[in-house]
């Protein structure tokens, strides 16, 4: 295939990706009923449902501005030969392939992150603020933004440098070494995420003495989960929205409850949400999803190794011969349809895991408390409880609330 054809395919893929996303957003917004649907009566009241609609509309508008803007910037940069021009500058600056790639990728990611900031700022201080969700001060916001940027730059540069370095000496099998390095890195990050990354942004504290801790202790003992592995995080520093998650592996595993969850839910509901999170651990969901993403990474690296030296890929983006960094960008765009399909597969699987964790909570604790806890969390955060089925199928990592309630009730009747 020559470079002109690849260029056209790249443009077509970018356009299709944008159009698909916009069409799905449109279909989903039209699916939202203007009056409170019967299925939501008893969950949303009229007033809250009105607030939900206004919130969704404002977010939808911002989302179309932001994705339209990124799309136009990308297409203009591509068609005007921006990638080739920037690559020429980087190559003139240094002969080292490792440095060239880092400069190239870091430069592009920095620009893309900076262009995102105004939209993110507006979402936080206009929309979230207006609906009473935002607790972030401007100082915390800017500190977060800088910390996130630095963190992704440092980690990204180290990993990328390793991959390119393998490429310079291991020949066609560089992908195997790179895969090994990425695997070690992901296992390390999953294990130490709570100890190394979370403290940069939040405080985690053990559960305080009291009746909640007693109830949690009784449940944790019953299902064989150590109380020491349960933490409370100061989510209220940024948002009033409540959450909980399971993270880590082996001795480094932990369930993290947001302080906002503890404020909003009754003690029984909190134990039910915790039971769901422990369900993820007992069903080995973290371990399995890590395995699947490592496998995916191996396939991506192998495919990339097959085409990194193909001059037509780099020439399609304006290079005069094959360059690692141009090949990387072209490959990433050409791979995007595969990534979309795999992403849908991962979401289908993730939703299956959510049902399993709900089942665990219903079996070992009380489904009714999980239902009332989930209702409170969803309504307080003005979640969309009636998404378009296709939109839900493609994007949702968790089943929508009504489906979860339905499944928990069916499960209750079975036991
Ligand atoms: Zn879950």
Image (spheres, grey):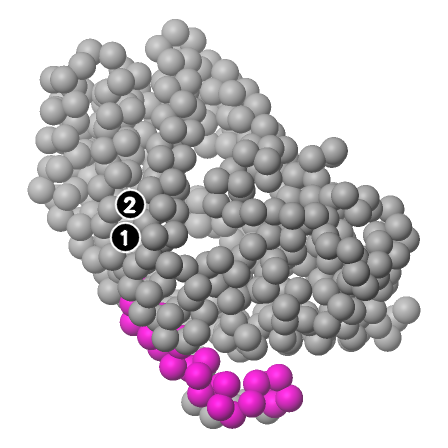
Q: In the image shown, does 193 or 297 lie closer to the viewer?
A: 193
Helix, strand or loop at label 1? It is helix
Residue 39 is left or right of residue 49, and the answer is: right
Q: Quadrant of residue 312?
A: top left
Q: Residue at x 59, y 39 (%)?
A: 194
Residue 306: where, in percent of width, then height?
A: 39, 23
Residue 359: where, in percent of width, then height?
A: 78, 62
In the picture as drawn, the residue positioned furthest to the top comes out as 169
- Residue 184 lies within the magenta run: no
Q: Cβ of disc 1 within 8 Å of ligand 1?
A: no
Q: Magenta residues: mostly which secondary structure?
A: helix
Look at the numbered discs 1 and 2 and tell me whether their residues touch, using CB distance below 8 Å. yes
Residue denoted by label 1: 117
Residue 207 tag number? none
Residue denoted by label 2: 113
Q: In the image shown, does 300 or 9 lie closer to the viewer?
A: 300
Confirm whether residue 20 shows in the render: no
Q: In the image shown, does 179 or 211 lie closer to the viewer?
A: 211
Residue 115: where, in percent of width, then height?
A: 23, 50
Q: Is residue 275 above or below residue 54?
A: above
Helix, strand or loop at label 2? It is helix
Q: Residue at x 53, y 66 (%)?
A: 241
């Amino acid at each position: 295939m020559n470079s002109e054809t690849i260029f056209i395919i790249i443009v077509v893929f970018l356009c299709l990706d944008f159009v698909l996303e916009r069409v799905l957003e449109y279909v989903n917004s039209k699916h939202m009923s203007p009056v409170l649907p019967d299925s939501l009566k008893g969950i949303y009241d009229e007033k809250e449902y009105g607030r939900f609609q206004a919130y969704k509309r404002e977010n939808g508008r911002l989302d179309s501005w932001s994705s339209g803007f990124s799309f136009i910037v990308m297409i203009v940069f591509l068609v005007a030969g921006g990638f080739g021009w920037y690559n020429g500058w980087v190559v003139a600056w240094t002969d080292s392939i490792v440095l060239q790639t880092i400069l190239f990728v870091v430069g592009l990611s920095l620009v893309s992150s900076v262009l995102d900031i105004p939209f993110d700022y507006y979402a936080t201080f206009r929309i979230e603020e207006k609906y009473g969700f935002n607790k972030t001060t401007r100082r915390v916001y800017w500190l977060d933004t800088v910390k996130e940027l630095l963190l992704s730059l440092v980690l990204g540069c180290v990993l990328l440098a390793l991959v390119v370095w393998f490429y310079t000496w291991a020949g066609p099998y560089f992908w195997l070494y790179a895969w090994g390095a990425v695997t070690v890195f992901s296992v390390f990050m999953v294990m130490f995420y709570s100890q190394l990354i979370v403290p940069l942004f939040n405080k985690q504290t053990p559960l305080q003495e009291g009746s909640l801790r007693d109830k949690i202790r009784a449940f944790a003992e019953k299902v064989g989960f150590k109380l020491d592995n349960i933490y409370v995080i100061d989510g209220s520093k940024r948002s009033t929205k409540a959450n909980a998650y399971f993270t880590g592996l082996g001795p480094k595993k932990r369930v993290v409850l947001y302080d906002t969850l503890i404020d909003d839910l009754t003690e029984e509901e909190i134990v039910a949400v915790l039971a769901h999170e422990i369900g993820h651990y007992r069903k080995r969901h973290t371990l399995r999803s890590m395995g699947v993403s490592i496998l995916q990474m191996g396939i991506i690296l192998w495919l990339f190794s097959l085409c990194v030296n193909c001059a037509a890929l780099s020439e399609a983006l304006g290079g005069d011969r094959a360059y690692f960094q141009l090949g990387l960008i072209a490959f990433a765009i050409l791979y995007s349809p595969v990534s979309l399909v795999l992403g849908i597969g991962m979401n289908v699987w993730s939703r299956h895991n959510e049902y399993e964790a709900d089942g665990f909570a219903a079996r070992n604790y009380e489904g009714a408390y999980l239902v009332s806890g989930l209702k409170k969390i969803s309504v307080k955060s003005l979640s969309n409880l009636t998404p378009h089925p296709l939109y839900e199928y493609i994007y949702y990592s968790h089943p929508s609330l009504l489906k979860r309630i339905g499944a928990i009730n069916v499960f209750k009747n079975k036991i």
